Image (tube, grey):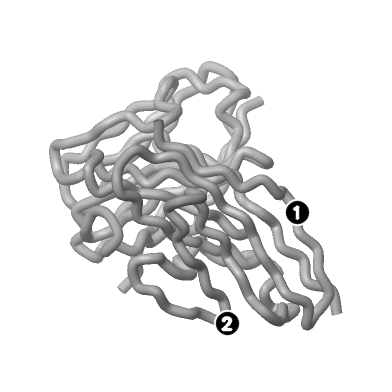
């Protein structure tokens, strides 16, 4: 079955601290993994996807197939990073469903 | 481009009433999706469509119906509203499947069933 698990509902850090938002997945084929972000009063939007291997707003995420994880990391958190973060999975071999995790709220205190 | 537009933004329904949430996109995307967002539960896929005339069930389809007569529109219908359908509903679309297609979301529709 296709599943995305984000174990933390809330993550609170101080500005300048490192951040790691955890994401684990379950999928039998080759997954495509994404991180979406929802800032206050804004639409959900794509933050980054593993296939691009990019860094957006200082965030990176590496797909670890051995541990079936796609954790989101940032070395120095900023207050403007406060938002709801969703990990999502899509499989190339299925019928194009994109499944989301339950989300982690990141709070960055000054 | 307006992107993905949802209407209405807010609605209160009585139990047993029916309504349709409208979704339209002007990006010529093939793929469209309806999600509901409940506190602590994240986003759950209700229905999706890979093109005009083709729809399929997601994780939580019960109590809902969809149609896709055009590429642009993907309405979500609630036939007999129940309190369990109180949620925020998001419509989304993308051009391609898998990893190459960024999902674009609407602003959401907050539905309360009393």
- Seen at 78% across and 77% down, the residue is A17
Mark 1 Cα-neighbour bin, 10 Å: few <14, some 14–19, many ≥20 = few
User: What residue sits right under mark 2 in the picture?
Assistant: A58
Q: Is residue B110 toward the left or the right of residue B4 in the image?
A: right
Quick check: can you spot residue B89? no
Percent position of residue A72, x then y: 57, 65
Quadrant in the picture for the N terminus of chain A: top left
Percent position of residue B41, x then y: 62, 38
Query: Image height check: is A97 above or below A81?
Result: above
The image quadrant of residue B58 is top left
Mark 2 Cα-neighbour bin, 10 Å: few <14, some 14–19, many ≥20 = few
- Seen at 57% across and 38% down, the residue is B111
Nearer-the-camera pick, B114 or B62: B62
Residue furthest front in the image: A66
Q: Identify the mark at residue A63; answer none if there is no mark.
A: none
Query: Image height check: is B93 above or below A96?
Result: below
Percent position of residue A75, x then y: 67, 79
Percent position of residue B71, x then y: 17, 51
Q: SS at mark 2?
A: loop
The image quadrant of residue A51 is bottom left
Query: Image height check: is B51 above or below B102?
Result: above
- Seen at 46% across and 51% down, the residue is A66
Nearer-the-camera pick, B68 or B29: B29
Q: Identify the mark at residue A10; answer none if there is no mark.
A: 1
Tell me the chain of label 1: A
Quadrant in the picture for the C terminus of chain A: bottom right
- Seen at 47% across and 58% down, the residue is A64
Q: Is residue B19 toward the left or the right of residue A79 in the image?
A: left
Tell me the chain of label 2: A
Q: SS at mark 1?
A: strand
Q: Is residue A32 toward the left or the right of residue B86 in the image?
A: left
| Mark sitting earlier along the chain (1/2) | 1
């Amino acid at each position: 079955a296709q599943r995305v698990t984000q174990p933390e509902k809330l993550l609170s850090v101080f500005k300048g601290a490192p951040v790691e938002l955890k994401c684990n997945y379950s999928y039998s084929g080759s997954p495509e993994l994404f991180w979406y972000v929802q800032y206050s009063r804004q639409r959900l939007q794509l933050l980054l996807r593993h296939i691009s291997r990019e860094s957006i707003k200082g965030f990176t995420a590496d797909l670890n197939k051995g541990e079936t994880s796609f954790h989101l990391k940032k070395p120095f958190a900023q207050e403007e990073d406060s938002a709801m973060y969703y990990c999502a999975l899509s499989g190339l071999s299925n019928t194009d469903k994109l499944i989301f995790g339950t989300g982690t709220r990141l709070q960055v205190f000054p | 481009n307006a992107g993905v537009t949802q209407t209405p933004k807010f609605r209160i329904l009585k139990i047993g009433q029916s309504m349709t949430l409208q979704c339209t996109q002007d990006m010529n995307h093939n793929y469209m999706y309806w999600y509901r967002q409940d506190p602590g539960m994240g986003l759950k896929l209700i229905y999706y469509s890979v093109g005009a005339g083709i729809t399929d069930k997601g994780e939580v389809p019960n109590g809902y119906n969809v149609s896709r007569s055009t590429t642009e529109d993907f309405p979500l219908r609630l036939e007999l509203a129940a309190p369990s359908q109180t949620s925020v509903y998001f419509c989304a679309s993308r051009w391609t499947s898998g990893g190459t297609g960024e999902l674009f979301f609407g602003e959401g529709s907050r539905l309360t069933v009393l």
